[in-house]
Amino acid sequence: MKFKPELISFNVCPFVQRSVITLLEKKVDFKLTYVDLGNPPAWFLEISPLGKVPILKVDDAVLFESAVINEYLDEVNPPALHPADALKHAQNRAWIEFGSEMIMTHYNMTIASDSNSFEKVKNQLERQFERLEKELGEGPYFNGKNFSLVDAAFAPLFMRIDLLEDQYPLNLYQTNSRVAQWARALEKLKSVKDSVTSDFRDVYSRFVKTLDSYYSTQINVTSA
């Protein structure tokens, strides 16, 4: 008997969201299980070599790291979300890694302890967006008309930036830029909207407020 894959998640993790988007784009029936990374259950630590999410359970096998999980999902659930050309495929994988770096830069910005360190990391993130802008074509997606795993990799970053922009505008990229157009195209997708819980805006805002950082003091969470 073949079991549906199970994705182990933490409710605000952008790397998990990448895999949820991929599963939804692929129309794969899957189970989503949440764990508290602040107090992880013993069974989770037994199957997660790095003690991190996402973890994908496929029958008796376990996969970890979102890029690896998404590559697997892409290979076993056609049609492919990676370009067929080997060089383009490799370039896409490289930009997924760049996206991972940007997610971590954004996280480091949210946990910066004071305004100086905050501005330093914010400037780093702005430079990364400037570099990304040079890589983008006419869109609407990273590779043009076709959605790819690169799009799944960047969508969680754009979502988190957008969710708090009205509370504390950062203006990390120009509103008429190719990056902005890409972000808007991704945020309209059903797979992206459905990749988080309906209360994610409040959940994520409250999470940021718990960070005891410079950024957390600048946003105003009014939801209960």
Image: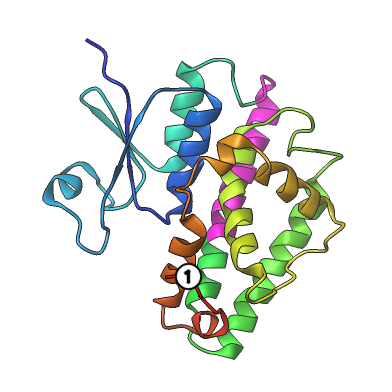
Q: Amino acid at mark 1?
A: Ser
Q: Identify the residue shown where x is 77% and y is 53%.
A: 179
Give the colouring mode of the picture.
rainbow
- Residue 192 place in picture, x, y as percent: 58, 41
Q: Main secondary structure of the magenta part?
A: helix
State the residue lying farthest toward the top: 1
- Residue 199 place in picture, x, y as percent: 46, 55
For label 1, the residue is 223
Is 34 located above or below residue 85 in the figure? Answer: below
**Location of residue 56 (image quadrant):** top left
Q: Identify the residue shown where x is 55% and y is 74%.
A: 109
- Residue 31 place in picture, x, y as percent: 32, 32
Q: Quadrant of the C terminus?
A: bottom left
Residue 90 belongs to magenta span = yes
- Residue 97 place in picture, x, y as percent: 56, 47
**Location of residue 47 (image quadrant):** top left
Q: Is residue 164 left or right of residue 111?
A: right
Is 41 located above or below residue 75 in the figure? Answer: below
Q: Quadrant of the N terminus?
A: top left
Residue 165 belongs to magenta span = no
**Label 1: few (<14), some (14–19) or many (≥20) C-alpha neighbours in 10 Å:** few
Please, what secondary structure does the residue beneath circle 1 have? loop
Residues rendered magenta in the picture: 83-103
Q: Closer to the camera, 16 or 205?
A: 205
Q: Is residue 26 left or right of residue 175?
A: left
State the residue lying farthest toward the left: 42
Q: Identify the residue shown where x is 15% and y is 52%.
A: 41
Q: Is residue 47 left or right of residue 25?
A: left
Q: Closer to the camera, 83 or 110?
A: 110
Q: Identify the residue shown where x is 59% and y is 89%.
A: 115
